Image: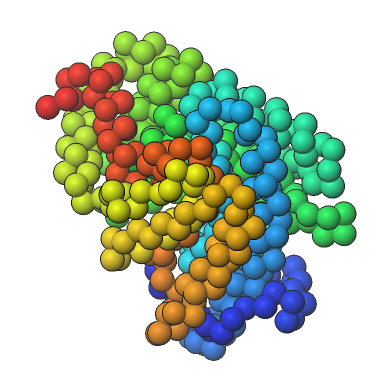
Amino acid sequence: MIVPVNTRPVNSGEIPLSTRQAKRYSKILKQTISDDAEQSKEAIDFVQRWRARYAPATRQCFQTLLECCKGVDGAIITYRLKRVSSIVQKIQRPNHNHLLNTLDDIGGCRVITKSIKDLRLIQKRIEDKIAGTSSEITKTKDYIDSPKSSGYRSCHLLTKQGSCERKYRVEIQLRTQLQHYWATALEIIDEIEGREIKTTNTDVLLGDTDTRTRLYYNQLTSSLIASIEESPTVPGTPKNIDDLVSEIETLPLSSEIISRLSRVYDDVLRLDEKHCAPEDACVFILQFLKDEQNLIVHSYANNQMDESLSEYSRLEDEVFENNKNGLIAPNQNIVLVHVNDPEQLKVAYPNYSANIKEYLKLITQNCPALDN
């Protein structure tokens, strides 16, 4: 969806922002199409200013994660502010009551690890680190020990970051590489099919036979990965890995999905040789222009962290300033990533082709009947 926006530079300190205003503008945005264009612009402008307030707290969280991940081989840390278009879409999501002032993920950081053992080590470090600061963990949503009915598996730490005077919600997602491959592949399948199974209420999904089958495929493949990781499987699916493989292989939709992903693999943006970074680079800003299938990579050494964070903020501002038509373009995404090896960028970026490749390899190696 593209929504109108006032593209003037945003200064979060211009006008005091209140929860009452956030509720009011959320109701305006929930109408999706407003007869009052000026009111819609006003609402989007408010979202921009509300979102901007989360930047310092999210940077603080990112720097905490850098410390907590030291010495953990292959740990990948990403930092982003939720795009304005994504915030609006979440508020407008059917069968949900999301309000701007209740969103937990406007500021977000993610850690991707090689194993659940590493994930739990980092989780413990985060808990210990935050315990000694003015920040706090308000809730832990462990979808690894208790997978969601959609098949989604990761661990979310809902935190409040900042000073004693003012704190902001920042969500920390902890997931393994296998969980990341699964989540990325299913986002791409959603995009191919023009659905939003990932974000749709499960009860709604069960009303449609085709969607119900797709949901079952998601659950089965998630449980397969859970079995490989020796973790609890998704409720309603077989617990034995042989039974899971049999279910996946005999489900007609499985071969269709594998075939579709194989066909789009060549169309997904890849990081080619010209994007190779200097040897000492470990901080990257990935600027993805989806409509142009163009990925711009900015590289920084570890001692350039402040510079990279400043550049991230500047690029975020440009997303709005460079839009000549005064529209929010949902197909631009900017992510800041910390990795120990530039090769890890193949895992870190959401729609990166390596994730599809690894997902296809994972499923076909365990379900050989699908390897055509």
Q: Residue drawn 47% across and 54% down? A: 299
Whole-percent x, y for residue 249 in the image: 22, 22
Q: Residue drawn 28% across and 48% down? A: 273
Q: Is residue 28 above or below residue 301?
A: below
How many numbered marks does the figure carry? 0
Q: Is residue 91 visible?
A: no
Whole-percent x, y for residue 351 in the image: 36, 48
**Nearest the camera: 320 or 191?**
320
**Nearest the camera: 248 or 110?**
110
The quadrant of the rendering that contains the C terminus is top left
**Nearest the camera: 312 or 141?**
312
Left or right: residue 76 versus residue 354 is: right
User: What colouring style does the render use?
Assistant: rainbow
Q: Is residue 319 above or below residue 206?
A: below
Left or right: residue 107 versus residue 276 is: right
Image-quadrant location for residue 223: top left
Image-quadrant location for residue 257: top left
Q: Residue drawn 83% across and 55% down? A: 163
Q: Is residue 90 above or below residue 67?
A: below
**Nearest the camera: 266 or 211?**
266
Q: Is residue 290 above or below residue 199?
A: below
Q: Residue drawn 46% across and 19% down? A: 229
Task: Residue at the far left: name it.
Answer: 372
Whole-percent x, y for residue 239 in the image: 42, 14
Task: Residue at the far front: name it.
Answer: 279
Q: Is residue 182 visible?
A: yes
Whole-percent x, y for residue 233 in the image: 47, 21
The quadrant of the rendering that contains the N terminus is bottom left
Left or right: residue 106 versus residue 191 is: right
